[in-house]
Image: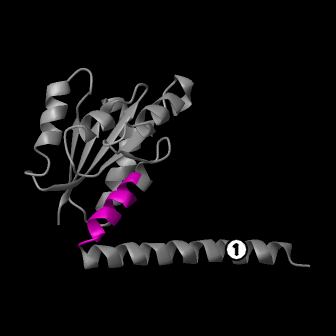
Amino acid sequence: MKKVGIVMGSDSDLPIVRKAVDTLKLFDIPFEIHVYSAHRTPEEAKDFAVNARKRDFGVLIAAAGMAAHLAGAIAANTTLPVIGIPCKSTNLDGLDALLSTVMMPSGIPVATVAIDGATNAALLAAQILAVNDVELAEKLDAKRKADAVKVLEKDEKVVREFQN
C-alpha cells in the first residue's frame, strides 16, 4: 500500500493533525509526518513534494494556519493528490487559512477540507488509496455502515423519548 505523507507548517498544528494520524492508524495506512514551513523551510518542503512519488507516497496532506501556503507549495511541486487542512488560529478563526488553501490557481489543485478537518482529510486520503486497494475499500465501507448504525441507534433513542 502507498503511504500518506503528512506535512504541517508548525508543531502547533499537531493537535489537529493527530486526528488524521489516528484515522490513518484505524485503517492500517502507513504514513510519514513532518514539520515543514512553506516560508521558513521552503527547500525542505519542496524536496519532500518533489521526491514524494519516488518515496512511495500516494497522497499528501498539508496542514497550516494563517497564510496557509503549505498545501499550495506542496501541490506546486508534485502531481500526487494534495489535501489541505486549513487550521484555525487566533486570526480570523481560520477563515484566512481556509481561503488560502481553497483558492488555488487553475492547474494546481488542492482538495480542501473544513477548518481543522483532519479526520476528513485522512478519510479522503484513504478513499484515494482505495481506488486501487479492494481491502481498504472494504474497510471504508464497513466504517460507513458502522457510522450509519450509530446514527440509527441515536434516532431510535430520540424517537422513543418523544413518542406520545
Picture quarter containing residue 2? bottom left
Instruction: List x then y, in percent, for residue 14.
Output: 35, 38
Verify whether residue 124 appears in magenta.
Answer: yes
Q: Residue at x 31, y 29 (%)?
A: 10
On screen, residue 62 above or below 158 = above
Q: Is residue 28 left or right of residue 54?
A: right
Q: Is residue 67 left or right of residue 147?
A: left
To which residue does mark 1 refer? 155
Quadrant containing the C terminus in the rendered view = bottom right
Verify whether residue 37 appears in magenta.
Answer: no
Instruction: List x then y, in percent, for residue 51.
Output: 10, 44
Per the picture, the main secondary structure of the magenta-coloured stretch is helix
Q: Is residue 12 left or right of residue 43?
A: right
On screen, residue 29 above or below 81 = below
Residue type beneath disc 1: Asp
On screen, residue 94 above or below 134 = above
Q: Residue at x 43, y 55 (%)?
A: 120
Q: Please, which residue is most extreme toward the front here?
A: 106
